[in-house]
Image: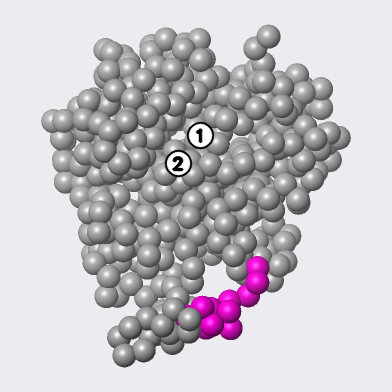
Amino acid sequence: MSRRIVVTGVGGITPLGVELHEIWDRLVRGQSGVGPITLFDASNFPVRIAAEARDWSVRQLGEDPTRWSRQARQTQFAVAAALQASRAAGLPDARIDPLRMGVFLGCGEVFPDFGQFCQLTAAAAHHGTLDLEQFVGESRRVAQPEDNLVLEPAAAAGFIAAMLDAQGPNANFTAACVSSSKAIGEATEAIRRGDADVMLCGGAHSMIHPFGITGFQRLSTLSTKNDEPERASRPFDADRDGFVVGEGGAVLVLEEIEHARKRNAEIWAEIAGWGTAHDAFRITDLEPQGRAAARCMSLALADAGLAPEDIDYINAHGSGTAINDRVETVATKRALGSCAYHVPISSTKSMTGHLTTACGALEALICVLVLRHQAVPPTINQETPDPDCDLDYVPNTARQLRCRHVMSNNFGFGGQNTSLIFSRC
């Protein structure tokens, strides 16, 4: 028997704020979270802008900041979002079998402290040659024993499980830009097949550091509009020149519907279906015809038992690179046919930046808020039409809109593609 899966809580740490009402208000007002980089000195970098999650602390959620001071920034995001979501779902006061509650996240690579890395390298270098023995010695002197765990992408899922006594399924997915949306899809499957009654799922990431910015810049994927930070992220616009790196985390609580009803939990939305497919193409390029991207949308529709005309809104991947936006447009037409021209589509990355492995989780949260508020956020900075991107991308102004079923799409490096469908319950 098919199990219905509902969302009973959400939480997020984002470039637009921490409180849900604040995030939503800024989305519908078209407010950008992009600004100059402050997390490190980027004055000599070709890219000096990002969408940082500013002015927040785990202290706001009742946690001792010193407990988390040595943990990776993404771990702090994930823990904070999970605390928000679990409280919104009423989990702390619920009698839930710990063996039936799990955690699936999509957190990415954690890079070592750049300053420390440079110090170690400089200390170990001798006459232009790296002395590996000295490098190891310096590493042991400077680094702490637990630092290896800090760098582990799965650390956040482990911390959350320990904090909430979630002894059920636990995993971290690293699949580029679809990591956290795949975590949500797989969490849905864990409940459907009876492995759990409750799953916390989502993801967190921060690549606003010298390694991250340099890596993406060398791939020629980042916007260089340093003098106009708020106008830099412009998905589907003819003058787009790349994405803006964002950071943050978002977590959803998924629950089997009868389990949620028995404890009188508030139901925010239903996750109706999902699909995933792979390009099997070049590692850094999207397959030009968008076949796999279209297939994952079609699979999500089939899983949800819906037709293309049932989708009322799509939160696009919409990264703002020339190739991504064009291929996504092609894929959407391939999957939805003529309905593609009638469904409102927006890229909230125009305001939040690209949260890399966490983007799917944040955009899933936004889809839940769309269903809750019956309005869709805009794609800001869409000013010059691109003939290759000729769908309704909700340019610059939010819309009140009756929404029953909404789709969230993510397409990433390595050919990964995932679609999620949320419905009003």
In this rendering, the answer to whether 298 lies above or below 362 is: above
Picture quadrant where residue 218 is located: bottom left
Q: Main secondary structure of the magenta part?
A: helix
Real-space CA distance between mark 1 and mark 2, rounded to the nearest whole angstrom: 8 Å
Q: Is residue 151 left or right of residue 336?
A: right
Mark 2 falls on what kind of element?
loop
For this rendering, which residue is in front, 27 or 189? 189
Q: Which residue is disc 1 drawn over? A: 182
Image spot of residue 260 (x, y percent): 75, 25
Image spot of residue 125 (x, y percent): 38, 85
Residue 152 visible in the current orientation:
yes
Q: What residue sits 65% from the left and 31% below the top?
A: 254
Q: What residue sits 67% from the left and 25% below the top?
A: 191
For this rendering, which residue is in front, 241 or 153? 153
Picture quadrant where residue 345 is located: top left
Q: Which residue is disc 2 drawn over? A: 175
Residue type, numbered disc 2 = Ala
**Which image quarter holds the N terminus?**
top right
Residue span colored magenta: 135-146
Image spot of residue 65 (x, y percent): 67, 68
